Structure formats: C-alpha cells, structure tokens
Image (cartoon, rainbow, N blue to C red):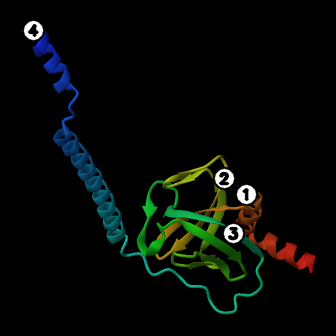
C-alpha cells in the first residue's frame, strides 16, 4: 500500500467517529433554551394575573338556588375581556381550562369545575350569550363554542364553554339572551 492510500484509509476511519461532546453540548443548549422559553411564558402568565389583581373574588353559588332549568356537561375553555377574544383573564383561576358542569337556575349560572375554582354568574349580571368559534387559545368550528357575556366588578367578561353535546348550545343562548322565554316555556310545561 502506498502512503497516500494509508492516509486516505486513516481519514475514512476517523470520519466515522462521532463528536459526542459537540452533540451533548447542542442537546444541553436546546434543553436550556426550551426551559428559558417555558419560564418566560410562566412569568408572563403570573404578570397577567398581577395586572388583573383588581378583579374581585369570583361569586359563589347561593344556597337554595331553585330548580335547574338547563344543565350542561362539557369543557370550560377560559374567559376574556368581552369583545376581545384574545385578551385572556387569568386572575382567580379564570384562565384555567377544565371540565365543567353548568346549571342554569332562576338565580343564575353555576359553573362547577373539578380541579379548578367553581364560580357563579348571577342572573342580573348576565348580558347575553352567543355561539362563536373561538376564545383565547381555542378555536373551533363556527358555532362550536357557547360564550356567556357577564359583568364581574367593573369588567364585562366573555366565558367560553363547549358542551359534550353541541346541540345543547342553542337552548342556552336562547335562555340567557331571552330569559323571559324560558320562564314562559317552563310554566307552560308544568
């Protein structure tokens, strides 16, 4: 074998060796970058909660609410400032997505959320309801989301829910937008 062939064979053998230090450095750097991005997102979430610190505590359901007029099981997707579907409200757990069970009574809407803070929307604070396609961080098909607009403190809030049975949404919109229709329907059914 000639010296040139020996050098070429030696180069081919060394090319097969992996630079583990370089690869480990890249992996560690990528993991640190991901951790930094996660930490910044978490700090942003906490800062948003601090900015919304003037929001009063969420109302709790009163005792003896009366007979349930409508019920719904599904998901709570979050709350935003009314009319601004990307301005998420995170104070008092309103930014936490969860399962939800809604009950409409004469007193208002009770929202029970396993694993998150329950709240109550008094009937006199409901400003309406509509079917929509999205709320901060969740976009669905047109009409796939029930959005209840209500007043809490000095803010008007949109809260988004999705029933396990989407066919229930129109009845909720009708009952919350025209509550007198529900009263007449309920009385006529008795």
- Which numbered disc, 1 or 4, marks the residue that appears first in the sequence? 4
Label 3 and label 1: CA atoms lie apart by 10 Å
* Residue 24 visible in this rendered orientation of the protein: yes
Circle 4 crowding by C-alpha within 10 Å: few under 14, some 14–19, many from 20? few
Q: Tell me the number on the disc at residue 166.
A: 1
Residue closest to the far left: 3
Q: Comparing marks 4 and 3, which lies closer to the viewer?
A: 4
Q: At x 49% / y 55%, what residue is drawn?
A: 136
Q: Are marks 2 and 1 in contact (CB under 8 Å)?
A: yes
Q: Is residue 181 left or right of residue 57?
A: right
Q: Residue 164: percent from the left, percent from the top?
A: 70, 61
Q: Which residue is mark 2?
A: 144
Rendered position, 92 above or below 148: below
Rendered position, 124 above or below 7: below
- Which numbered disc, 3 or 2, marks the residue that appears first in the sequence? 3
Q: Which residue is mark 3?
A: 73
The secondary structure type at the circle numbered 3 is strand
- Which numbered disc, 4 or 2, marks the residue that appears first in the sequence? 4
Circle 3 crowding by C-alpha within 10 Å: few under 14, some 14–19, many from 20? some
Label 1 and label 4: CA atoms lie apart by 76 Å
- Which sits in the foreground, 172 or 29? 29
Label 2 and label 1: CA atoms lie apart by 7 Å
Rendered position, 170 above or below 109: above
Q: At x 53% / y 75%, what residue is drawn?
A: 115
Label 4 and label 3: CA atoms lie apart by 77 Å
- Which sits in the foreground, 92 or 25? 25
Q: At x 66% / y 79%, what residue is drawn?
A: 108
- Which numbered disc, 3 or 1, marks the residue that appears first in the sequence? 3
The secondary structure type at the circle numbered 4 is helix
Image quarter hosting the C terminus: bottom right
Image quarter hosting the N terminus: top left
Q: Which residue is mark 4?
A: 4
């Amino acid at each position: 074998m000639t010296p040139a062939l020996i050098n070429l064979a030696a180069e081919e053998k060394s090319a097969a060796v992996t630079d583990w230090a370089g690869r480990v450095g890249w992996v560690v750097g990528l993991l640190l970058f991901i951790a930094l991005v996660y930490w910044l997102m978490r700090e942003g979430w906490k800062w948003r909660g601090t900015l919304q610190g003037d929001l009063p505590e969420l109302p709790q359901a009163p005792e003896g609410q009366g007979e349930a007029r409508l019920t719904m099981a599904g998901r709570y997707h979050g709350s935003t400032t009314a009319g601004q579907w990307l301005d998420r409200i995170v104070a008092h757990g309103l930014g936490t997505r969860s399962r939800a069970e809604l009950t409409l009574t004469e007193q208002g809407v009770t929202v029970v959320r396993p694993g998150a803070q329950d709240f109550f929307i008094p009937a006199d604070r409901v400003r309406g309801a509509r079917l929509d396609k999205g709320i901060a961080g969740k976009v669905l098909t047109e009409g796939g989301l029930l959005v209840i607009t209500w007043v809490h403190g000095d803010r008007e809030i949109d809260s988004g829910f999705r029933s396990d049975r989407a066919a229930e949404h129109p009845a909720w919109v009708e009952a919350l937008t025209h509550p007198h229709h529900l009263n007449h329907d309920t009385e006529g059914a008795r």
